[in-house]
Image: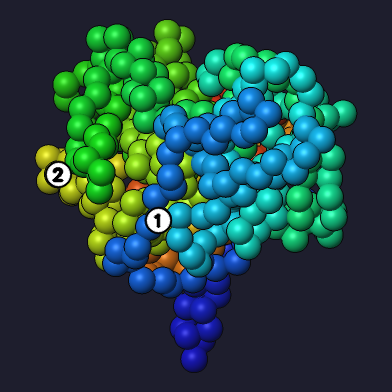
Amino acid sequence: MKYKILHLVLLGCIISACKNTLSTVPKKSPTGYQGQGASPIVPTVNKPVQKQWKGIWSLDDQTYFSNDFDGARLNGVAEDGNDHYTIWITAENTPINVSPWYSFKVWTGKPRKITIKLSYQDSRSRYYPKISDDGKHFKALDSVKFKIINPGEGDFGIKAAPEFVEITIDIDNEPVWISAQELYTSKRVREWVDSLSVKSFVSNHEIGRTHENRSMQLIEIKEYPNTKKALMIISRQHPPEVTGFLVMKSFMETISGDTEQAKNFRKKYAVFAVPLMNPDGVDNGHWRHNMGGIDLNRDWENFNQPETKSVRDFLNKKSDEGYEFVFGADFHSTWDDIYYPIDSTVIGQKGKIVYDWIESITNRLPQKNTNIAPSDKIRPTMVSRNYFYVHHGMPAIVFELGDNTPRDFLKEKGKVAAEEIMRLLLEY
């Protein structure tokens, strides 16, 4: 009997010691956005998608609206009189996550001030308007030109968003772009990928094709041929989630930078990244889905979609070649900054680096509260983080950035996140 008691005591000490080696970052911060619940299990076989009509709406008073460009979303326009217009925004199919993306151009032959009301199919107004003169450089609309109609309730989520908004802008014969977030279409992302690839140790190549035959581009940062430890990074499974992409962009630029830390890191580690997981959805102005009508971040169990298949096949190939994946991150956007790691009770000591990483980012950027919502559900794998861990053994996380997080802070957060993962991996 005494040996049984001693065994239990020792087992308790081992468990306690293991727990104490993990970061002391709380599972959930006491305030702010607490994250969404468990992701529902949904079928991922193709569903119909209704492509929006593309063209120019010509109104009687020489005012023009257009969705005839990549990334646009505009489904209807009505002239209400007195320089007031109502536009309709609908999703690619239903049911769908409420991410009501919009992007359109407007101009006129008779320069003046107009008011535009944004209305949606089965949604409220989630994204604060961004405005641009060239479709590339955007800034948030001046708040004095923004009016809420029927405000929501609470701080986060679609119920907190207004039912409608009205925006007032000055227009002339030069188009003005109005968009839910900055436009980073497949063409623009490819330009960034090519600019990064001018460095001798950065390359890119195609790992697959989408439903509409767009290229699935992968970035490879590898400076030393014998490097077999690697990170896997993905972004933009959901088209409107631009803030996640912006942090990923800064993250990759930092790792490929000229600092001594980055140079030392690249001696030991390679980095693989798919910066645009859903190019069809992005270019078609989708709210959430790919051209198969599916949320890609529900297809990491069945792999019915070409985009997830491409990454799965790439990872399997690299594992067969002897690569060890030591860290994975999937960059997203939501209502406010939040981390979704795998719970320490599931991932144990292997996940220590993820929690240490979160803590070190938090210590360096204390000005922005970032909540943490671990998940103890890893099967079915369904979402990328779970697939990365279950099938390739890599500690992985979903890294979500707020829709309205300041852009300069996004760049800094991506830089800090890269510096801290490099530091930790070099120390481990």
Spatial separation of the CA atoms under disc 2 and disc 1: 35 Å
Horizontal and vertical percent position of residue 225: 16, 21
Please tell me which residue is depicted at 44% across the width and 19% down the height of the picture. 253
Upstream in sequence: badge 2 or badge 1 = 1
| Residue type, numbered disc 2 | Lys
Horizontal and vertical percent position of residue 340: 55, 53
Horizontal and vertical percent position of residue 268: 30, 25
Please tell me which residue is depicted at 41% across the width and 71% down the height of the picture. 42
Q: Residues within 10 Å of mark 2 (few under 14, many from 20)?
A: few
Horizontal and vertical percent position of residue 346: 47, 64
Tag 1 residue: 50
Of 83 and 320, nearer the camera is 83
Residue 343 can be seen, yes or no: no
Disc on res. 317: 2
Please tell me which residue is depicted at 50% across the width and 33% down the height of the picture. 56
Is 31 rendered above or below residue 109? Answer: below
Question: Which of the colour schemes (rainbow, by chain, secondary structure, one colour) is used?
Answer: rainbow
- Residue found farthest to the bottom: 1
